[in-house]
Amino acid sequence: MYVFNTASRQTDAVGALHHLPATPNTVHWGYFDASIKPALRVRSGDLIRAEAVTHHAGDDPDLLMDDGIREIFTKIPEEDRNPGVHIMTGPIFVEGARPGDMLEVRYLAMRPRLPYGSNLAANWGYLYKEFDERERVTIYRFDDATQQAEAVYAYDYPGKYLTPGKMFRCPECDRQSALPGARVPCRPHLGTAGVAPAVNGRVSTIPPGAHGGNIDNWRIGANARMYYPVAVDGALFSIGDPHISQGDGELSGTAIEASLDVLFQVIVRKDFQFPSPLLETPGEWIVHGFDEDLDLAMRGASLDMLGFLTEQRGLSRNDAYSLMSVAADFAVTQVVDGRQGVHVRMPRSVFPPER
């Protein structure tokens, strides 16, 4: 196995720029599927400006929807929104990508499409029963000048929030004051993105896995690079579940869910392999582990970071194990997506500068 060099000049060529709007014909709602006809075909090195639409836009259609988003909600039938919940833009077929390759995705920019987002204290949230099994929606406003969000109002959702994607008329509900004076730092990112798994039929967008999916790591934003293991020809990459901000854990079941316009570059990497989605930021390498059992997710993240340090950074197993204990930070990514997530962050600064 080759040690990959993220600064390699061989991957720095910039190709064509494509635009991929989110429309009823270019999104798939709730699933990855290797048999979907690509919404776009690109070459390695190409740039894509794509629209990612939140499946929570119906929490306040007046604030979270424009005509394009409303068309997706009204034209895609409810019976075609399964088995997951996220609206995914794509898939994108990347020429030359083959099983065994890695798809490097360089996220370059993410901007809110509309200045509003929704947070739901959901029935799948971690502390749902602590709130008498009631669900509450909080609508936030994004301030571009300060890069902060503040709550506009909140309301108690009537009944049980079973199907994200419904449109609820909140002008007719009991609006309540929420979080007076509080300001939330904004960090736009994609909660769900990934390649198609090598599985027949639909794969739910809800649980994360080796293909990516619903990782819900807020660091998957601008200036980050993700490396996804390619499982099918063309990779078939899709993006969705856009967020304005989220904390580690995603405790209530959702982030501030808001539509984003995303600029990214896709690059086929044949010089290294990795078993799980690998995240690189300007300051860290981040490895993920997933499992229904949080302890097993922790073990998976530990073993994959051990592999990264030995196979990609050239350390011995003993040295890598010691370094992980003294320099790596482990954290819970999310506890609400079926397969729980743990991520481990290794500072790049512990190594000599890359040439």
Image (spheres, grey):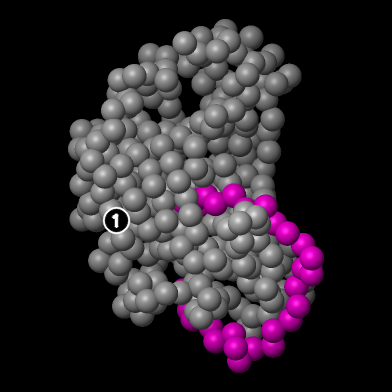
Residue 81, x across and y down, in percent: 38, 69
Q: Is residue 124 at least partly visible in the picture?
A: no
Q: Is residue 232 above or below residue 164?
A: above
Place residue 157 in its image quadrant: bottom right
Is 354 on the left or on the right of 301, as rendered?
Answer: left
Residue 221, x across and y down, in percent: 51, 44
How many residues crowd around disc 1 within 10 Å: few (fewer than 14), some, or many (20 or more)? some
Is 166 on the left or on the right of 17, as rendered?
Answer: right
The kind of residue on which mark 1 rests is: Leu
Q: Residue at x 33, y 26 (%)?
A: 12
Q: Nearer the viewer, residue 23 or 196?
A: 23
Q: Is residue 146 above or below residue 330?
A: below
Badge 1 is on which residue? Answer: 20
Q: Residue at x 68, y 80 (%)?
A: 155
Q: Nearer the viewer, residue 184 or 195?
A: 184
Q: Furthest residue to the bottom?
A: 172
Residue 286, x across and y down, in percent: 56, 31
Is 239 on the left or on the right of 250, as rendered?
Answer: left
Place residue 125 in its image quadrant: bottom right
Residue 224, x across and y down, in percent: 49, 37
* Range drawn in magenta: 165-192
